[in-house]
Image (cartoon, coloured by chain):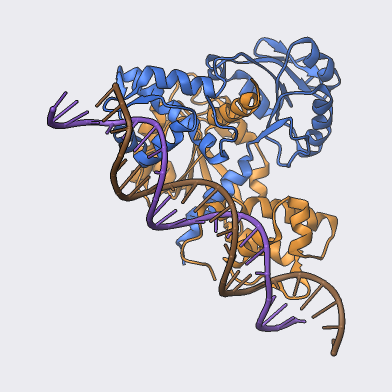
Chain colours: A orange, B blue, C purple, D brown
DNA sequence: TAGATTGTTAATCGATTAACAATC
DNA sequence: TAGATTGTTAATCGATTAACAATC
């Protein structure tokens, strides 16, 4: 069904396809051609067909692609048909914001616990959870079938916690700390470096100045 | 000093160089070679030299690169020597988290105002600011020399607000809404699609499963 | 001067686009 | 069947890596 190694750049386009197909679904569209989709998404039709073909033939010659079918298939490729249990480590502003963000649940991502190391925060209520002490992380992960850890803490803490997560054999880490984590290849790390993103914006703003 | 058009992929590596050079500075290191830096950053020395050379010669043969000088130069390229005034539009969990995040100020990004359209939120205190009504955005941007707008609101709202921002001739938009904004090329949009990022993580977790 | 390391050119690799035969 | 549009191969483009002459 799926090529051995899909390139990073193809993977990174899948969520965007998924979003557009969701919109098309909502519009009630039944079928779409790569040409039509290319106009909407502002990419070439060639790229769309190449991308989809990495995963097998989703379309039909002379017809195009069935919107509902394609939406479901891309969802499956992205693993959105599976349930994911998360813990948030770091109950500061960002950690709390993510804990309260309901939309992830729609896609099967459930926040099961939230942790912090600060005495003043431990025990406080976030959404329907009490913030737990970070020392409890390892046992919590084992007992609650957690596969994703979200790191929303300062970089020193993140590096330490990453070691614990490696021992727990977590599946993936969603890393918001401004540090590159050193973990084995078996654990996938997806970085969200907000300050990097803001710097890129800053560069672009000044790029064409004199 | 700078090539006409630096490719996206080079730009996206600059903040990471900047971060590593900051660490080296903190360690008190005075000079570093591309070979040494390549080991630390896990990229090729060739790439490092190519990247830096897009912006002119920062190094010295036989010596390497001066850490402080290189740090400052990359900072300047990223526009971090300039002051940026931001408004946050959408005072929900994420908007408030970003408003409270102090580290951006270190780099010259100052949050000057925060806005929302919900009656229940307008007037409440976030950090040292009162949340203002979104209807005031246009005049506030003009009066306060704002160059960046941070969009932390649902996609319908983001699309509407983007039109207002275009009229205000804002320099850049940091977009957290799950929608691709339609703005002229003169306004640069940097997207942070958190759900896309989480989906990529999900894909990677399941990639090697059977 | 000799050693080290850059800046830069050339070679390789991979990703995108174009083209078109296959086929619904 | 004729028209449309995919799946796929070939051509192009761009990015990465290797190599080495320039030079500090």
Q: Is residue A132 above or below residue B67?
A: below
Give coordinates of residue D5: x percent, y percent. 76, 70
Quadrant location, the C terminus of chain A: top right
Q: Is residue B148 left or right of residue B9?
A: right
Q: Is residue A41 above or below residue A121?
A: below
Viewer-nearest residue: C17 or A34:
C17
**Residue drawn at (68%, 54%) of the image:** A17
Give coordinates of residue A25: x percent, y percent. 79, 58
**Residue drawn at (67%, 49%) of the image:** A106
Quadrant location, the N terminus of chain A: bottom right
Viewer-nearest residue: A108 or B150:
B150
Q: State which quadrant residue A103 falls in.
A: top right
Viewer-nearest residue: A116 or B32:
B32
Q: Is residue C9 above or below residue B14?
A: below
Viewer-nearest residue: B201 or B77:
B77
Q: Is residue A157 visible?
A: yes
Give coordinates of residue C18: x percent, y percent. 68, 62
Q: Is residue A115 visible?
A: no
**Residue drawn at (86%, 21%) of the image:** B135
Give coordinates of residue A209: x percent, y percent. 65, 22
Q: State which quadrant residue B132 falls in.
A: top right
């Amino acid at each position: 069904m799926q090529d051995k190694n899909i390139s990073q750049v193809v993977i990174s386009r899948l969520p965007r396809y998924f979003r557009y197909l969701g919109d098309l679904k909502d519009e009630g569209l039944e079928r779409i051609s790569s040409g039509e989709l290319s106009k909407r998404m502002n990419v070439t039709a060639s790229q769309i067909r190449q991308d989809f073909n990495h995963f097998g033939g989703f379309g039909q010659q002379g017809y195009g692609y069935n919107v509902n079918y394609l939406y479901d298939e891309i969802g499956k490729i992205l693993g959105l048909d599976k349930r994911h249990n998360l813990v948030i480590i770091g109950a500061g502003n960002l950690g709390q914001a993510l804990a309260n963000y309901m939309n992830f649940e729609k896609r099967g991502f459930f926040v099961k616990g939230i942790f912090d190391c600060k005495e003043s925060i431990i025990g406080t209520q976030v959404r329907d959870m009490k913030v737990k002490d970070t020392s409890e992380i390892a046992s919590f992960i084992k007992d609650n079938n957690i596969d994703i850890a979200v790191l929303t803490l300062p970089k020193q803490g993140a590096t330490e916690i990453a070691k614990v997560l490696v021992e727990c054999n977590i599946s993936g880490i969603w890393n918001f700390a401004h540090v590159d984590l050193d973990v084995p290849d078996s654990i996938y790390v997806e970085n969200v470096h907000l300050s990097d993103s803001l710097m890129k914006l800053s560069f672009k703003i000044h790029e064409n100045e004199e």
